[in-house]
Amino acid sequence: MSMVNLLAGDVGGTTTRLGLFETTASRPRPIAVREFATLDFPDLRSMIAAFLEAAPRADLSNATACFGVAGPVAGDAASLTNTPWPRMEAGAIARDFALSHVHLLNDLEAMAYAVPVLESAEVHVLQAGRPAADGNVAIIAAGTGLGESFLHRVNGRHVAIATEGGHADFAARTERDIALLRHIVTRYGRAQVEDVVSGRGLLDIHRAIHADPCQATIDPDAAGASAAISSAALAGRCSGCVEALNIFVEAYGAEAGNFALRTLATGGVFVGGGIAPKILPALTTGVFMRAFRAKAPFEALLDAVPVKVILHSTPGLLGAANFCSHT
């Protein structure tokens, strides 16, 4: 029977990852990890049951659990923002699986707790900067939606703070952005940041700028269209897709810079989520960082902020486990 003292989860709108971990001196060590399509299950409880049934036998009687959830957490309960699951309650999960305690965190709050234990090979540096040892650290992550959190320096240690910043208003910066803003407001009634900086945001950018037929014949309403647009853009198969990805990357960089200012993230900005590693060539052209720094009169401040892309495949899961190991 495996020596397990942590059950962790990263519960997303599209994909959920669950894992069994044991505590070590450096960071939690995974024993069993599995990925699920979120909508293949009616709720988190049934998914956990399926995971544990297939996982190595483990004594969870003294285990704690932590789940990062893609939505707001209120007290000991949470709901997914973009997925029609019933509300998750920590106490009910603890009772159902005889766990000693269950913690619910916002998914970006959980990802933030991975940052202190990431290794150098698990990030790609966009800007080395000059990190302040006592500075806050911001985390921004585009995927199904857009998540934002930060590590606030309190009495010499970092405490993760959840936000719903992805649902704030999209700030148009250029005439091209203004045209996109009109498109989104017409379609949805309001333009959130995640209506632009997310997988579905890329689809709306594609719709907005393709006056001519897509040279890569991509239908933005088809399954997998967001990945197809990125692929066509990176391969140069469609000039419209190239422009769409460029707009996306610029908006991503601009919002990362905005969030760095809002949180005074002199300790660094980490770019997470499922999209960034897949479009890394587009993030390294300079477009992202130019938009990040274009915040007069604070260019010098932002020039000193380290900016890194998270390459670790499951930072939300690692962060949830790491939070558990220190509580």
Image (cartoon, rainbow, N blue to C red):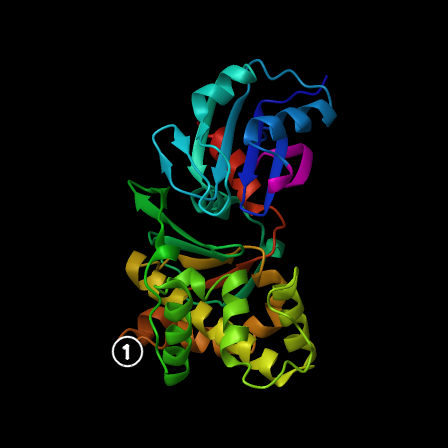
Q: Give the magenta part as a residue range.
A: 25-40
Q: Rate crowding at label 1 as few (under 14), some (14 to 19) or many (20 or more) other CA atoms within 10 Å.
A: few
27 in magenta: yes
Res. 157 visible in picture: yes
Whole-percent x and y of residue 4?
63, 22
For residue 275, side relative to residue 112 (left or right): right
Image location of residue 66, percent across then percent down: 50, 31
Q: How many marks?
A: 1
Where on the picture, by quarter, is residue 290?
Answer: bottom left
Q: Is residue 31 above or below residue 163?
A: above
Instruction: Tell me if residue 181 comes above or below residue 90 in the rendering.
Output: below
* Image quadrant containing the C terminus: top left
At horizontal 69% and vertical 77% (from top left) the residue drawn is 217
Residue at 68% x, 37% y is: 34
226 inside magenta stretch: no
Farthest left residue in view: 297
Residue denoted by label 1: 296
Q: Nearer the viewer, residue 193 or 279?
A: 193
Query: Which is nearer the eye, 89 or 1?
Result: 89
- In the rendered structure, the answer to whether residue 161 lies left or right of residue 51 reads left
In this view of the protein, can residue 304 be seen by the observer? no
Position of residue 320 measured from the top left corner of the image (x, y, whole percent): 51, 37
Which residue does the image show at 28% across and 73% down from the upper left?
298
Tell me the amino acid under the disc marked 1: Ala
Q: Is residue 215 above or below residue 5?
A: below
Q: Secondary structure at mark 1?
A: loop
Q: Position of residue 143 (x, y in %)?
A: 53, 56
Q: Quadrant of residue 32?
A: top right
Residue 186 vs residue 307, the one in the foreground: 186
